[in-house]
Every structure is written in structure tokens, then in C-alpha cells.
């Protein structure tokens, strides 16, 4: 009789202990299913902040690439690249206007907007004066024209660097806040 009671007790103990072997997750950071795959809970706010940062950075990079293409144009493609660049800036400004500002991202977005405005103003102003010089073959340019191109490029880069510094500062502050 003691053996029957012992067998019943052991069987009941095994049945009671045979519940789920999934680990308990008190922090809700991860969960493990029966296949052993760990799933991470995503912080949606953090993802949104990263997406906002990425969108602004992409706008800035795409326009910067277009500006570089313009400045390195072959003489026969200067006018077309100028039109393409102005069009790209207009598109990116529209994209920027439609973007919802993520909390704490106003300065970052405004920095990118200011850079695009600088590009737009410069391409319609000072850059228009050097287009005829860019349309000449390198051998046909006088030393004065070459110096004018180099001086313009230097001034443009210095102004551009100021906008980059403001954007970098705003982006860093945004990243720290989020």
C-alpha cells in the first residue's frame, strides 16, 4: 500500500510540475516562445525619433550630393544640372514642409530648412554669375576666371559649413533628448 501511495504521489507531483517551461519575464523587455526565439519589445517612441533623424539626414545628404554634382559638372551639362539641383531642392523643401516635427526636433528641422534656403538663394544669385565660367572648357578659362571660380567655391563652402555646424549642433541635442 505504501508503494501505491508513493506512485500516486510521484505521478501527481510530475503532473503538477509539467507546466510551461517558458521563462517568466518581469521586465517585459523580451519574451521567449516554445521555439526558443527571443522577441524584443520595441520602443516606438525611440523608433520614431530615429526615423525623424534619418529623414532629415537623407534630405540633407541628397541635396548635398546634387550640389556636388552641379559644382563638378562638365561644361555641356552645367545648365541641366543647375535645373536638376533647383528642382531637387524644391522637392526636398516640400518634403520638409510635410514632415511632422518630432518632439524636440524643431531646431534640427529648421537647420535643414535654412540650409535648403541658402542653397536656393545662392543658386539664383551668386552662382548664376559663375555659370558662364563653368560652361567654358578648363583650357579656355583665363587665370582671372579660374581665381574667381576658386574664390566663389571657397566662400560657398564657408557659408555652407556654418549651416552644417548649426545642423550638427541641433542634431546632437535632438539625439541626446531622445
Image (cartoon, rainbow, N blue to C red):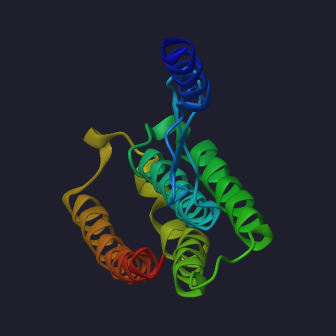
Eyeballing the image, is 167 above or below 149?
A: below
How many marks do you count on the picture? 0
Camera-side residue: 129 or 25?
Answer: 25
Question: Which corner quadrant of the image does residue 22 belong to?
Answer: top right
Q: Decide if residue 42 is on the left or right side of residue 97.
A: left
Question: Which corner quadrant of the image does residue 151 belong to?
Answer: bottom left
Residue located at (36% from left, 39% from top)? 137
* Residue 172: x %, y % from top left: 37, 77
* Residue 174: x %, y % from top left: 46, 79
Residue located at (60% from left, 64% from top)? 52
Eyeballing the image, is 127 above or below 2?
A: below
* Residue 41: x %, y % from top left: 58, 51
Camera-side residue: 121 or 138?
Answer: 121
Camera-side residue: 10 or 21?
Answer: 10
Q: Indicate the quadrant containing the N terminus: top left, top right, bottom left or bottom right.
A: top right
Residue located at (56% from left, 13% from top)? 4
Residue located at (59% from left, 19% from top)? 8
Q: Residue furthest front?
A: 1
Eyeballing the image, is 64 above or below 174?
A: above
* Residue 178: x %, y % from top left: 48, 75
Q: Decide if residue 110 is on the left or right side of residue 157.
A: right
Eyeballing the image, is 82 above or below 10?
A: below
Camera-side residue: 6 or 14?
Answer: 6
Amino acid at each position: 500500500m505504501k508503494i501505491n501511495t508513493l506512485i500516486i504521489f510521484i505521478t501527481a507531483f510530475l503532473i503538477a510540475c509539467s507546466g510551461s517551461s517558458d521563462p517568466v519575464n518581469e521586465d517585459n523587455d523580451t519574451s521567449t516562445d516554445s521555439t526558443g526565439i527571443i522577441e524584443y519589445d520595441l520602443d516606438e517612441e525611440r523608433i520614431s525619433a530615429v526615423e525623424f533623424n534619418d529623414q532629415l539626414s537623407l534630405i540633407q545628404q541628397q541635396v548635398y550630393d546634387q550640389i556636388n554634382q552641379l559644382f563638378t559638372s562638365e561644361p555641356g551639362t552645367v545648365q541641366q544640372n543647375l535645373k536638376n539641383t533647383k528642382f531637387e531642392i524644391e522637392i526636398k523643401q516640400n518634403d520638409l514642409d510635410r514632415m511632422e516635427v518630432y518632439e524636440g526636433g524643431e531646431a534640427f528641422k529648421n537647420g535643414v530648412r535654412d540650409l535648403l534656403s541658402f542653397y536656393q538663394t545662392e543658386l539664383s544669385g551668386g552662382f548664376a554669375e559663375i555659370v558662364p565660367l563653368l560652361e567654358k572648357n578648363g583650357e579656355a578659362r583665363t587665370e582671372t576666371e579660374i581665381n574667381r571660380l576658386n574664390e566663389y567655391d571657397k566662400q560657398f563652402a564657408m557659408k555652407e559649413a556654418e549651416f552644417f555646424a548649426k545642423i550638427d549642433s541641433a542634431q546632437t541635442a535632438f539625439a541626446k533628448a531622445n
